[in-house]
Image: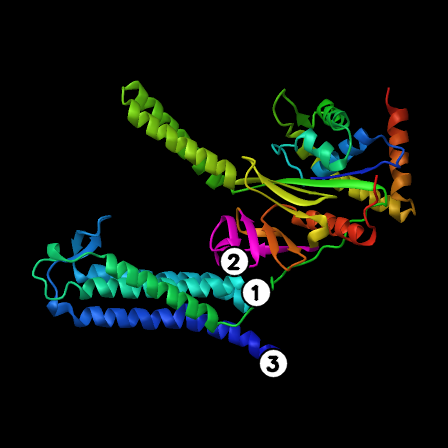
Amino acid sequence: MLIRIDASSDISIFEQVAASIRSDMAAGRVRPDDKLPSAREVAASLGVNLHTVLRAYQVLRDEGLVDMRRGRAAVVTSAAGDLTELMGDIRDLGARAAALGMTPDALASLVRDTLRTSQP
Amino acid sequence: MFEETQTSVVRRFILVALVAPAVLTGAAIALQLSWRNDLPDPIATHWGPGGVADGFGGLATLLIVSTVLGLGLPGLIAATTLPLLARGARGANFRLMASVAVGLSALSAVLNTWTVDMQRGLSDAQNSPSVFPALVAGYGAAAVAGAAGWFFQPRQRAVVPGVSHPEALNLAKDERAVWMRTATIRRPFRILLLAIIAALGAASTALWIVGQETASWIYLFALAVLGLSMAATTTFHVTVDSTGVRAVSALGVPRVSVAIEDVAEAGVANVNGFAEFGGWGFRQRPGALGIILRNGESLQVTRRNGKRLVITVDDPATAAALLTTFASRTRTMPPVAP
């Protein structure tokens, strides 16, 4: 599992941690039933606050991607497998956007804005 | 010149690991057979802890033992190691494997032949003398043959065939990253070990219920030993971050690490536990330390002194790429005091 964070980014650290784990799930590098490493170790390795990592894990729990019980490791749920299937669609979309000359960042913000406005 | 040394590595491996054991075993069997009319029937084939004969059988038993130990085991070592050597793999561990093969063969030849020789002229194998001199001579011969086999082979600089070095990960200047992964044995083996632990637990409980308390404690002790060794040797948490790479067992010990300043190279290669490390588990070999929990893809970290750390873990390419990134950062940017 690869977690990357960039302190100079506008996106908050806990969202970056969650996003890293989510893309690992989508890429199939983290699979259902895998245990996430302890938040304490991740925090120590990245040099960030423990609560930042815990918050990232809570985001993933709220999305149903991990299962967390007190005193036990966070476990990846089967929903992470569905995320892997989404990857094909995302690649197709990326290829079409690239053909139109769009950058990945432009596509990502277009997707974000579109979904935000279309949600009730 | 280079080509010549390369072929001599393989040729001398074959001479040490196969030809020498074949000669030793052939001579041992010929000698043992030549004495067949001077031997009691049955002959002693096994000796207890006190050095006194406690197992008896025909000469055929000893001939089979001589062949399996003296030629079968070296053959197994060669069969798993030679394909790798042929593919271009080199390293002190291969030199050691051949030396172990000929040492085993010498042990078998001397021990078995000596024990047959000392029974010549006896009317009853019960009176056969102590096995200790034969054991001492056998292990002495093994040490001499092993050392001779080692020095007969040329020195080998470590070469890992098929090793690839993934490109460094594209991290921004301020970007931080960590890679973590749990390396473990394959599922059937884990299930088997857990089943044994469960069976020991059940046996211990059942013995306690029927009042066999001492036996119950013994089973509980065996369970604890197996459980602890499983936690210490079958699961490792592997981390790559800006400080380097480390692997810590589920128990907490053993733990291995390579500091980022000490990382010369990080790569990915397939590993065969038996051929390259003489088995699986936490393996120390000349020039390499292995956490070998299965065959297959592995993270290969080379230290500045040329020694390797090999860990069989999934997704090693990402780990190697990240380690390469941090290593080049350390080389180009000396650490700044906070």
Mark pair 1, 3: CA separation: 18 Å
Quarter of the rendering containing residue B61: bottom left
Label 3 chain ID = B
What's under tag 3, amino acid-wise? Met
Left or right of B301, for residue B102: left
What's under tag 2, amino acid-wise? Glu
Left or right of B238, for residue B32: left
Q: Residue at x 53, y 59 (%)?
A: B286
Quarter of the rendering containing residue B130: bottom left
Asked whether residue A85 is in view, the answer is: no
Q: Residue at x 66, y 33 (%)?
A: A37
Q: Position of residue A50 (x, y in %)?
A: 74, 27
* Residue that numbered label 2 is attached to: B276
* Residue that numbered label 3 is attached to: B1
The quarter of the image holding the C terminus of chain A is: top right
Label 2 sits on a secondary structure element that is helix
Q: Position of residue B288 (x, y in %)?
A: 57, 56
Q: Which residues are magenta?
A: B264-292
Q: Residue furthest bottom?
A: B1
Looking at the image, do the residues carrying marks 1 and 2 touch, with CB atoms under 8 Å apart? yes
Label 3 sits on a secondary structure element that is loop
Label 1 Cα neighbours within 10 Å, binned few <14 / some 14-19 / many ≥20? some
Label count reads 3
Please tell me whether residue B209 is drawn above or below residue B55 in the rendered image: above
Counting residues from the N terminus, which is met first, the one under dot 3 or under dot 2? 3
